[in-house]
Amino acid sequence: MSPAAPKAPRRFWRDRRGAAAIEFAFIAPIMMLLYFGLVEFCQGYMASRRADHTASIVADLVAQSDATSTQDLTQVFAIGDMIMRPFPSSELSIRVSSVTRDDKGVAKIDWSRGNDKALSALGKNTVVTDLPAGLIENEESLILGETEFKYTSAFGQVIKTPITFTRSYYLRPRTVNKVACSNC
């Protein structure tokens, strides 16, 4: 055996060429996971915020009017679809309803209209039990805008089932005591 043979293992451990490539190989997968995780979180958050905004805009547009009709509400729903862009409007369900609390304190639906997706219209005189306390007094009315959006991850291998974002938004009518719907 030559005298240089025992020095080869020591020389191998002291040689630092290629250390950066090995460190990068260890760190790159973690950095990629962080990057794609942040992209996914931002996309989901943006979808949630747009669904929230759609509920508020729908309720606000109806609350500003003296009266409405199914044709008017169809146009309002189209505005909601535009707000959701670039997300698919096919996954967005919108419902707007007028709720009045009677003299006995029972909140009931005056009229309701949905965009014919998951949130369908509620029947007239349906009792509404989930209004926040103190929102309206007896003989007062409000407009309830609701949205439901099924968010499907761009990385379907990680999050296989859609996440559903729901939002309810309450507004009092601005110019009248109760917004009427002529053909709802």
Image (cartoon, rainbow, N blue to C red):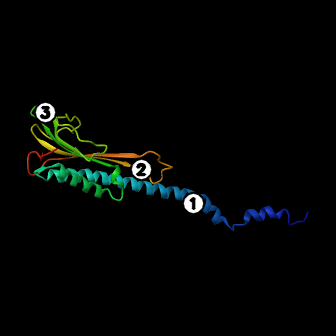
Identify the secondary structure beneath mark 1: helix
Kindly report which numbered mark, 1 or 2, lies closer to the viewer in this rendering: 2
The residue that label 2 is drawn on is: 152
Q: Is residue 121 left or right of residue 32?
A: left
The residue lying furthest to the top in this view is 104
Which is nearer the eye, 161 or 19? 161
The residue that label 3 is drawn on is: 105
Mark 2: amino acid: Thr
Kindly report which numbered mark, 3 or 2, lies closer to the viewer in this rendering: 2
Identify the residue shown where x is 48% and y is 58%: 35
Identify the secondary structure beneath mark 3: loop
The residue lying furthest to the right in this view is 1
Kindly report which numbered mark, 1 or 3, lies closer to the viewer in this rendering: 3
Compared to residue 45, the image places residue 131 above or below, namely: above
Sequence-wise, which precedes: disc 1 or disc 2?
1
Please provide percent x and percent y for residue 62.
17, 51
Crowd tier of the residue under label 2, counting other residues whose Cα lies within 10 Å: few below 14, some 14–19, many 20 or above = some
Identify the secondary structure beneath mark 2: loop
Whether residues under marks 3 and 2 lie with C-beta atoms below 8 angstroms apart, the answer is no
Crowd tier of the residue under label 1, counting other residues whose Cα lies within 10 Å: few below 14, some 14–19, many 20 or above = few
Q: Which quadrant would the N terminus be assigned to in this image?
A: bottom right
The span from disc 1 to disc 2 (Cα, nearest Å) is 27 Å
Please provide percent x and percent y for residue 182.
12, 46
The residue lying furthest to the bottom in this view is 17
Q: Is residue 21 left or right of residue 81?
A: right
Compared to residue 27, the image places residue 118 above or below, namely: above
Sequence-wise, which precedes: disc 3 or disc 2?
3
Q: Which mark is residue 28?
A: 1
